[in-house]
């Protein structure tokens, strides 16, 4: 046991002492913090753009719609900015008016132009062209303004009083979402959504980074030829176990530190957000029970073991960085698979795809925790996933120790798949 | 202590395309300095790895220090310096040594003390400089080799196995290594080293084993080996050119297999079964004026070349150029 511990301690301490670890640990929460704060900042400023009003309206409706849209746009949250200029033209003069407006956009005097014609009222169609079409909030504002004025005009036409029409159209219904779980209700759906993505990404990143770290460690021992001295003192399976536990311990340490720092940042977020003038009322911590937290950590540990084994096996078959790039590819692809289905799983956590991916050993460590944060998952499925990943991890570590034992002292030509299979069977 | 340090019986190791070791049997007595000699690819490193249970033989048995080589307690009693040398480059020297010591079951204060002792002894801590605190990367190659050597000896092993220990050493470090091997022998430890530098083997080894193509060519004490394979050459010095009668003696194939005539100096290879004494008597009988008559024992180098065959030896391999 003393020797295993010596390996674990070396792997752990040499990494924790490195500058890389300190930097990653400190900047991790800044990164996650950015994920937390930036959406709040963006939403508080989403109406602040003045570009939405710096446009020309080409009005060929002959109904004064252009003027009404113009004054509505000017009267937004940031009222007081200049209203869009309106160019009232006849239907057959749209083309020259458009080319004039295009010139203005190109010269930079306006951001874009909106074309309103006879189709706008009847078929609810309008066109916008400009340099800022990717500014989604501005586009939404323009669309809403046109829609509102078209509705108002239709209502007024059928004899509805303007004030009544305004008050009816101003009514908006806000549907709040609340997540129901077996233990009761709590947390908004959206928060769990964001939290689910965060959990999946953190798991993915840590498994990825520390899995590769195991590969690098194996490669380093091979390249520096230190492997033979070590292997003469401790069995290859124990050396591998020590490596996986040591590196995994570093990953776990980082996760726990990140978690602790995130909690602290969450506690002090109010004054920070207030400084940016952002609203914190809508923000609440997702309801994640201790049990779920422990299950997520269990998935990290098992998932890491599964991938660390595969990465170690890949590392034992190569002699250089370049070869390592190629050998790690299949393992990386396996890992990336789970994250590519992120969207599907988030929006349809109960679909067959989600359920299958959440119990397969290579995807379960990321997909199951993701599913669990966005929807209630039957305990049986969670147990099945844990069992599947456990078996996968045992299999992967066993396989790795077989390949590792032979590969560690093999130099020269990179072995073919056939040779590697032979190593597994070698006594 | 009566059992041999190493007892190898008929080990075989096959790989896909070749047989690395073919039915090798050898015994290393305790307390001996033992040389494992052979050209590159002879199977020395494979044999050493099997001794250390890093790889398993396909056939045969190996006993080390009286127990089967797979005995888990054995690794702590052996010190090993592999041919391919290397250390964790980014690690501090002292931490590397501590790790290597821990892998041999050491720990605590006594380990620190041992590291200090060895750093001093190998002059890695001298004149106010402590290389123990430096990273492995910062050391010269010679110093790195010293660190590795310390790593192999830190736990006072009963058996020390050194694979090509002299390769890449400068004369000063080579001498330090020789001194240490002699020290180890004085302390009663068994030292096995593989080499293709016959000079070193001849000077330091009590016994040797020459292997080639995975097979044992010969083994035994250095003196015995030279005795058994020597005394076939006679250096003959004459006062003046050999007379006709002396020529007749030299042409006698019962006595002389071959004679390299350099006028006044001749190198004679005795015929099979012939005795040097008979040749001397015949030469004296023929009236030769003998200035020198010496039985020349062949060096290990010569035996090696003869036994392994020049085809197996690359230029420079024997260390004699």
Image (cartoon, coloured by chain):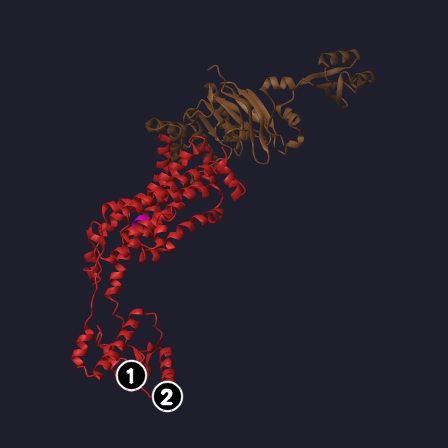
Chain colours: A red, B brown
The picture places residue B1, in percent across and down from the top left corner, at 46, 15
The picture places residue B233, in percent across and down from the top left corner, at 70, 19
Q: Which residues are magenta?
A: A23-27
Chain under callout 2: A
Q: Residue at x 26, y 64 (%)?
A: A42
Q: Is residue A48 above or below residue A64?
A: above
In space, the residues marked 2 and 1 are separated at their CA atoms by 17 Å
Of marks 2 and 1, which one's residue comes earlier in the chain? 1
The picture places residue A235, in percent across and down from the top left corner, at 43, 32
Asked whether B46 or A59 is in front, the reply is: A59
Q: 10 Å neighbourhood of mark 1: few (<14), some, or many (≥20)?
A: many
Asked whether B151 or B1 is in front, the reply is: B1
Q: Is residue A30 above or below residue B240?
A: below
Q: 10 Å neighbourhood of mark 2: few (<14), some, or many (≥20)?
A: few
- Whether B9 is among the magenta residues is no
Query: Badge 1 is on which residue?
Result: A86
Q: Is residue B202 visible?
A: no
Instruction: Check residue B196 in the rendering and tell me which mark sits there, or answer none.
Output: none
User: Mark 2, mark 1: which one is toward the viewer?
Assistant: 2
The picture places residue A96, in percent across and down from the top left corner, at 38, 86
Asked whether A401 or B206 is in front, the reply is: A401
Chain under callout 1: A
Query: Badge 2 is on which residue?
Result: A92
Q: Is residue B181 left or right of residue A125?
A: right
The reply to whether the C-beta atoms of the residues labelled 2 and 1 are less than 8 Å apart is no
């Amino acid at each position: 046991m003393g020797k295993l511990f010596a390996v674990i301690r070396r792997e752990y301490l040499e990494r924790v002492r490195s500058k890389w670890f300190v930097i990653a640990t400190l900047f991790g929460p800044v990164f996650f913090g950015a994920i937390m704060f930036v959406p709040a900042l963006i939403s508080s400023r989403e109406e602040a753009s003045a570009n939405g009003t710096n446009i020309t309206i080409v009005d060929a409706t002959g109904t004064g719609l252009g003027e009404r849209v113009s004054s509505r746009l000017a009267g937004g949250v940031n009222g007081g900015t200049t209203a869009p200029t309106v160019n009232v033209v006849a239907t057959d003069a749209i083309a020259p008016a458009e080319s004039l407006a295009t010139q203005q956009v190109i010269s930079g005097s306006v951001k874009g132009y909106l074309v309103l014609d006879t189709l706008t009222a009847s078929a609810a169609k309008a066109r916008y062209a400009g340099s800022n079409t990717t500014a989604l909030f501005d586009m939404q504002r323009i669309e809403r303004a046109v829609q509102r004025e078209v509705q108002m005009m239709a209502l007024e036409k059928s004899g509805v009083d303007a004030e009544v029409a305004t008050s009816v159209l101003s009514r908006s219904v806000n549907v709040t979402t609340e997540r129901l779980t077996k233990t009761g209700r709590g947390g908004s759906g959206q928060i769990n959504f964001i939290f689910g993505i965060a959990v999946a990404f953190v798991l993915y990143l840590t498994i990825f980074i520390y899995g590769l770290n195991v590969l690098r460690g194996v490669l380093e021992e091979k390249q520096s030829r230190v492997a033979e001295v070590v292997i003469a003192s401790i069995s290859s399976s124990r050396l591998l176990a020590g490596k996986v536990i040591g590196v995994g311990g570093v990953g776990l340490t980082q996760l726990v530190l990140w978690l602790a720092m995130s909690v602290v940042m969450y506690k002090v977020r109010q004054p920070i957000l207030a400084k940016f003038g952002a609203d914190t009322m809508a923000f609440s911590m997702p309801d994640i029970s201790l049990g779920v937290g422990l299950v997520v950590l269990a998935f990290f540990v098992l998932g890491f073991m599964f991938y660390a084994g595969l990465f170690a096996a890949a590392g034992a078959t190569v002699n250089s960085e370049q070869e390592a790039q190629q050998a790690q590819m299949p393992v990386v692809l396996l890992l990336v698979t789970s994250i590519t289905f992120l969207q599907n799983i988030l929006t349809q956590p109960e679909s067959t795809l989600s359920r299958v991916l959440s119990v397969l050993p290579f995807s379960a460590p990321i997909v199951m925790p993701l599913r669990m944060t966005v929807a209630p998952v039957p305990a049986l499925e969670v147990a099945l996933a844990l069992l599947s990943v456990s078996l996968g991890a045992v299999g992967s570590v066993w396989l790795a120790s077989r390949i590792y034992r032979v590969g560690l002292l093999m130099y020269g030509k990179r072995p073919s798949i056939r040779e590697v299979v032979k190593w597994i069977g070698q006594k | 202590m009566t059992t041999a340090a190493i007892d190898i019986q008929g080990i075989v190791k096959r790989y896909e395309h070749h047989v690395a070791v073919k039915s090798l049997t050898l015994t290393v007595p305790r307390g001996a300095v033992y040389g494992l000699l052979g050209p590159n690819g002879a199977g020395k490193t494979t044999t050493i790895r099997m001794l250390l249970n890093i790889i398993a033989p396909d056939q045969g048995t190996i006993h080390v220090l009286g127990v089967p080589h797979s005995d888990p307690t054995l690794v702590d009693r052996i010190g090993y310096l592999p041919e391919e040398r290397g250390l964790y480059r980014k690690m501090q020297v002292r931490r590397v040594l501590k790790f290597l010591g821990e892998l041999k079951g050491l720990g605590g204060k006594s380990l620190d003390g041992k590291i200090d002792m060895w750093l001093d002894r190998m002059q890695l801590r001298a004149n106010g400089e402590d290389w123990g605190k430096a990273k492995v990367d910062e050391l010269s190659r010679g110093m790195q080799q010293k660190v590795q050597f310390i790593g192999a000896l830190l736990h006072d092993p009963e058996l020390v196995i050194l694979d090509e220990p002299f390769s890449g050493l400068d004369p000063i470090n080579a001498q330090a290594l020789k001194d240490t091997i002699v020290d180890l022998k004085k302390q009663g430890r068994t030292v096995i080293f593989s080499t293709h530098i016959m000079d070193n083997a001849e000077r330091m080894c009590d016994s040797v084993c020459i292997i080639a193509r995975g097979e044992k060519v010969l083994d035994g004490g250095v003196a015995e080996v030279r005795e058994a394979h020597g005394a076939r050459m006679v250096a003959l010095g004459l006062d003046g050119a050999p007379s006709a009668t002396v020529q007749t003696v030299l042409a006698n194939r019962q006595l002389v297999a071959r004679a390299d005539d350099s006028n006044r100096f001749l190198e004679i290879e005795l015929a099979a079964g012939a005795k040097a004494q008979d040749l001397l008597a015949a030469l004296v009988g023929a009236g030769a004026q003998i200035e020198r008559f010496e039985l020349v024992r062949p060096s290990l180098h010569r035996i090696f070349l003869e036994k392994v065959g020049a085809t197996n030896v690359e230029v420079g391999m024997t260390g004699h150029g």
